[in-house]
Image (cartoon, grey):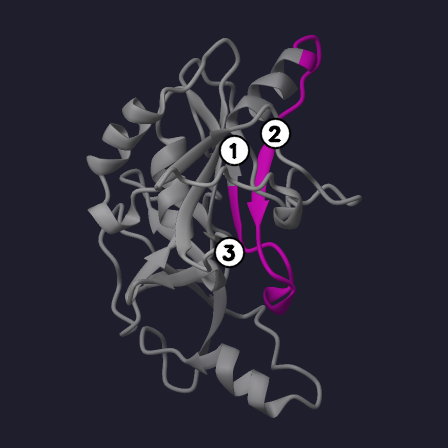
Amino acid sequence: VCSGEALPGDLVNRFHTSAAHHTIALHNLYGPTEAAVDVTAAPCPPTTTHTPSVPIGTPIWNTQTHILDTHLRPTPIGVPGELYLAGHQLARGYTQRPDLTAERFTANPYGPPGTRMYRTGDLARWRPDGTIDYLGRTDHQIKLRGLRIELGEIEAVLTNHPHIAHAIALIHHDHTHTPRLIAYTIPTPGHTLDPTTLRHHTAQHLPDYMIPTTLIELDTLPTTPNGKLDRTALPTPPTPEA
């Protein structure tokens, strides 16, 4: 069982290769503490195709999942939105934090009267097969020149390229305090990445203002001692030429 971190597709294949002589199934689970931990699950068979992200699956028993826009309207298949949870296992709220409880636990317009939803703060989208893709955190949403940008959406488009295993997008302020949209990418084994090709790929799926101005290829992503991504340790982008 994998839970607590996004599961890369290449790790699924590494697992099945190492477990080839054993009868072991792999399952990807997702869920926050506020919903008694795991609320979705997906089996993870080996794949022969490039799979940058593994779906977090479908809701378990007595759980409902909703992917909604900023007006609490359901998003279409493939369109990112915020993931909301409903069901019997939701917590009642945060101890002695009524303000935070009111912010994260909201009335459920898609359930019986009196029921609630939990606002996860996670960005997700529906796949055509009815499973859910986890795309990152909504609190990585930024504004650039007055335009709202979901960094997780940029990362999802980049990792859909067959030669990219991982991607991280962020805003960097250069020496003149000018904000720049930067993307760090890690290629799949045996491939190198051409920035022009990647920009063309990104432009096919995103508007111009969401295309990174600088693409930086890395061998690995820096991590903290507990294995999570350390954004502060990413290398400083080169200064653009005048």
Residue type (three-letter) at the residue carrying disc 3? Trp
At x 61% / y 81%, what residue is drawn? 92
The residue carrying mark 3 is 61
How many other residues sit within 10 Å of disc 1, few (<14), some (14-19) or many (≥20)?
some
- Of the numbered discs 2 and 1, the one sitting upstream in the chain is 2
Looking at the rendering, the stretch of residues picked out in magenta corresponds to 18-41
Quadrant in the picture for the C terminus: top left
Question: CB of mark 2 within 8 Å of CB of mark 1?
Answer: yes
Residue 5 or residue 181, whichever sits in front: 181
Q: Which mark is residue 20?
A: none
Question: CB of mark 3 within 8 Å of CB of mark 2?
Answer: no
At x 42% / y 86%, what residue is drawn? 114
On the picture, is 211 further left or further right than 164? Answer: left
Gap in angstroms between the C-alphas marked 2 and 1: 6 Å
- Of the numbered discs 1 and 3, the one sitting upstream in the chain is 1
The residue carrying mark 1 is 43
218 above or below 66?
above
Residue 158 or residue 119, whichever sits in front: 158
How many other residues sit within 10 Å of disc 2, few (<14), some (14-19) or many (≥20)?
some
Q: Residue 201: where, in percent of width, then height?
A: 26, 29
The residue carrying mark 2 is 26
